Amino acid sequence: MKRIGLMALLAAGMTAQAQTQRVNVIPAPVLLQEAAGQFTITSQTVISADPVFRDAAALLSEQSGIPLQGKGAQTGNIRILKEILRKQADSAAYRLIIDPQSVKIYASGRAGALHGIYTLLQIMGTQPNQRVLPAVAISDEPRFTYRGLHLDVSRHFFPLEFVYKYIDLMAMYKMNVFHWHITDGAGWRLEIKKYPALTQQAAWRTHANYMEWWKSPRHYLEEGNPNAYGGYYTQDEARKVVAYAARRGITVIPEIEMPGHSEEVLAVYPHLSCAGEPYKQSEFCLGNDSTFTFLEDVLREVMAIFPSKYIHIGGDEADKSAWKKCPKCQRRMQHEHLANEEALQSYAVKRTEKFLIANGRKLMGWDEILEGGLAPEATVMSWRGEKGGITAASEGHDVVMTPGGYCYFDSYQSDPSTEPLTIGGYLPLSKVYSYEPVPAELPADKAHHVLGAQANVWAEYMPATYQVEYMVFPRMLALSEVVWSQKDKRNWNDFKTRLQAHYRLLQRKQVNYYRPSVQLEPKTVIDTVRRLTIVSFETEQYQPVIRYTLNGTRPNATSALYTTPVEVPGTAQLTAAVFRDTMLMGRPVTVPVHYHKAIGKTVTYNTPWSGSYPAQKAATLVNGYRGSLTYGDGQWQGFLGKGVDVTIDLGTSQSLESLSIGFMQITGPGVYMPTEVKVQVADDPKAFENIPAITVANDVPPAHEKLIFKDFTFDLRGQKGRYIRVKAPVQKGFLFTDEIIVY
Ligand code: ACM
């Protein structure tokens, strides 16, 4: 016991040392060279700056507590210097040199100076002693110009102080676009002087919790009503947010939703809907000129607050059914020769784009703005996968990639059974990190249309700021590297190592980040040459202590230590867990290992598998790999029609002990258990016609909707033969099976 405790201590000590010896910058810079020595910040340390960087230097002074020298003085030991870089586009580039005597930041433009400052602040924030900085030389510039993070303040309203904190954290990781989702059905959040009801009523609703409101009749209340929940930002406050962000190198893009997601507007200005009454529709009436007058009035005030080149007009998820029945919409379609309601939506987007362009701005919208034809100069935010982005970029439009599978930070980041409720999905940190914003399908000459990527933070399930922080961090750090770092600098293991130091920074900034999971994720490889199963483990923990047993018992502090992938001959119940000293963390994971008799043998399909779900074709059922939670994983083979009817050839006649075959049922997509499973053993396949089968009936009712797995197991003791025939008739829909395990 003693020896183990010591080993764990040693491991922990090594971890701490590994972290303090390195400069850990996220996102990874283009070049970083560590050097000997360190710069120590003392009471004598002062900042000076070239006059053009005076304000950036003031920001560094405010954030670090280090005084800024008076105007004109250029003798600080932390200096921000102007240099002419290779080309104008390098205004975002910088160099940072820390040596024992001085800290110097070189940049040609303000963005570069800020990037250098934030790298310096990051080095301070990640060091155990924030005043002792390791010597280093960094040369850096971004890969993408658009590095976005979004925040939905409609579903739940977040106070200004939090918006400032959010922007500060974005800046720390060189994210440069704050997409402020400021209007939606759950509440309008910006003062519009010409339309006061938007903030007197449309900003307030009957329930504080969005999901409770969603399940209710979804009504709004007057501000001041004791039961009203909501809020809004005044124009002055929004201007302050814009200035606060701009000072940190961040552009704020406001989103004003149209034509859908607008229940709150239509509740207070019902004449702008097809029905003409509140609480009937979410979409503006597009046959009504008042709609465009309203939108243009609002956008005029919005443009006066937000100087961004882009104005986001939403455009997503509009229900077109009211337009089909609305005489005004139909008249518009006739008059404008619009073939259908998609074209009517496109008309509205194009008309809005014309207005924005006339005011010197550009339109951005969700990928639904492709429906019915894209507005001539629109920029598309691709959220329903990458397809919209690929189409728009191929047509020569700029795009921002924000596909749900990689960029929706409202999805789970760990096992849902252990996490606070979210909208669904599964997006662990490693998957965010794996994202590549330029789709492989996009022709190379169109790649420059991908401006970058963005994560979206929809707040349906985030009633409080601490939950927003939990969902965004550390995933935003992974995204920052996706959008900033050069492709060849991205390395998951290296990121994970650097990340360890950033937890310290997030703690210092009092961020309620998601703590790295202690859950082990097993990975199995079958070695058919050596007839072994090789099991390795991944976890979000850094250099974890993992212990395991091979007999299914719960591992304890004296169980075998996992150091390299475990090679298991034959059968085992490999059970492993993460330990901190002698304490088992989280839940152990059990990997059933079966190097069974049928692995790698020949399977004849008496009926074919479904062309849509071939999995690993004829190898699938005897390759040693079990399927995972989803039938689309390439290990579950699908069957229709007559179901499963296969014959396994073991090569030689053998005495058998058992057989089991796994199936899944999930009725939503039409996946059911077989009616029964029949097994026969023979030395001659012709004999199957004449010998009886052993049958195991299904006992999972077809009404069982939720995902369930079942292994149909057969006792074959006393049976001998070379061939095994397995039949499993379809009950209804699809059959999915992953492995036939023979002993
Ligand atoms: C969206 O997630 N509806 C853009």
Image (cartoon, rainbow, N blue to C red):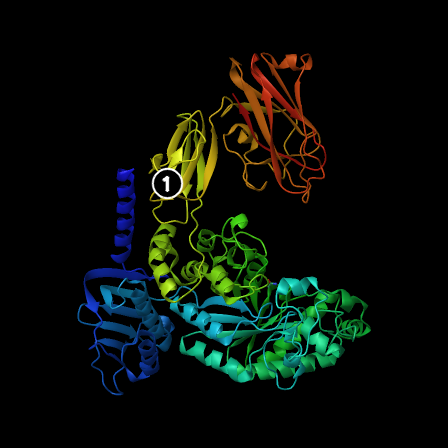
Q: Residue shown at 55%/67% (left/top)? A: 397
On the image, the x and y values in percent for residue 93 come to 34, 70
Question: Does residue 454 show up?
Answer: no
Of residue 209 and residue 740, the one placed in the foreground of this image is: 209
Q: Residue 665 lies in what quarter of the image? A: top right
* Placement of 319 over or under 265, stated as above or below: above
Number of numbered callouts drawn:
1
The correct choice, above or below, for 670 with respect to 347 in the image is above
> Can you give x and y, in whole percent of width and height, for residue 491 in the image?
37, 52
Residue 240 to residue 689: above or below: below
Q: Quadrant of the N terminus?
A: top left
Q: Quadrant of residue 462?
A: bottom right
Q: Nearer the viewer, residue 63 or 655?
A: 63
Callout 1: 10 Å neighbours few (<14), some, many (20+)? many
Of residue 310 and residue 391, the one placed in the foreground of this image is 310
Tell me if residue 45 comes above or below residue 98 in the rendering.
below
Ligand 1 sits in which quadrant?
Answer: bottom right
- 332 relative to 52 in the view: left or right: right
In front of the other: 386 or 178: 178
The residue wearing badge 1 is 546
Three-letter amino acid code at the position of disc 1:
Ile
Q: Is mark 1 within 8 Å of ligand 1?
A: no
Q: Residue at x 48, y 78 (%)?
A: 241
Is residue 106 among the parts visible in the rendering?
Answer: yes
Image x and y of residue 139, in percent? 29, 66
Q: Is residue 40 left or right of residue 221?
A: left
Residue placed at 55% from the left, 81% from the top? 360
The picture places residue 458, in percent across and down from the top left corner, at: 56, 64
Q: Secondary structure at mark 1?
A: strand
